[in-house]
Image (tube, grey):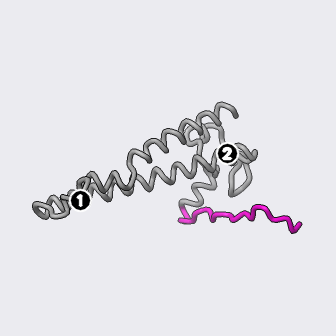
Amino acid sequence: MDGMKKRLEQDLKAAMGRLRQTGGGVVLEAVLGPTGENWQFADEVDGIQASEQREIGLATRQLLLGRVNRLAAALDRLNDGSYGICAECGEKIAAARLRALPEVHTCVRCQDFLERTGRQLEPVEVEVGSDDE
């Protein structure tokens, strides 16, 4: 598991680096200029292109943010001993699947079911620091 931890950490570092490179302010600055001097576009086509670039940048940022979150969650599962166990059925996730997509939290069968039904895993809220028990 040390090799997988190292891979997850490297993937997380790379994804965070790419996320920093595509920061929201950087995307807008590239389109509008550092002081917003390009607010008035020369023509409609320029406006459409700028809007398209902004949307692509924001979508890329959203995808990277999701990957960072999944990788961080995978590291948490690795640290608590639940890494490699399907969150749906509790069976082991195939090693080949983990090598290909180290951040996955479901086995192929459960992921297929989730995709066919259009359902996503519901986030589980954990109460931390409760001493009532």
Name the foreground residue: 47 vs 4: 47
Provide the secondary structure element on which disc 2 rests: loop
**Left or right position of 40 against 84:** left
Percent across and percent down for residue 16 are 49, 44
Quadrant housing residue 124:
bottom right
Is residue 84 found inside the magenta-colored segment of the image?
A: no
Q: Which amino acid is tagged 2?
A: Ile
Residue displayed at 57% across by 50% down? 70
Q: Is 133 placed above or below 73 here?
A: below
- Distance, label 2 to label 1, CA atoms, is 49 Å
Q: Is residue 8 found left or right of 77 in the rendered image?
A: left
The residue under label 1 is: 36
Q: Is residue 127 magenta?
A: yes
Which residue is label 2 attached to?
A: 93
**Nearer to us: label 2 or label 1:** 1
Pointer 1 local density, CA inside 10 Å: few below 14, some 14–19, many at least 20: few
Q: Residue furthest left?
A: 42
Q: Amino acid at mark 1?
A: Gly
Q: Magenta segment, which residues?
A: 116-133
* Secondary structure state at the residue bearing disc 1: loop
Discs 2, 1 touching: Cβ within 8 Å: no
Q: Is residue 78 above or below residue 125?
A: above
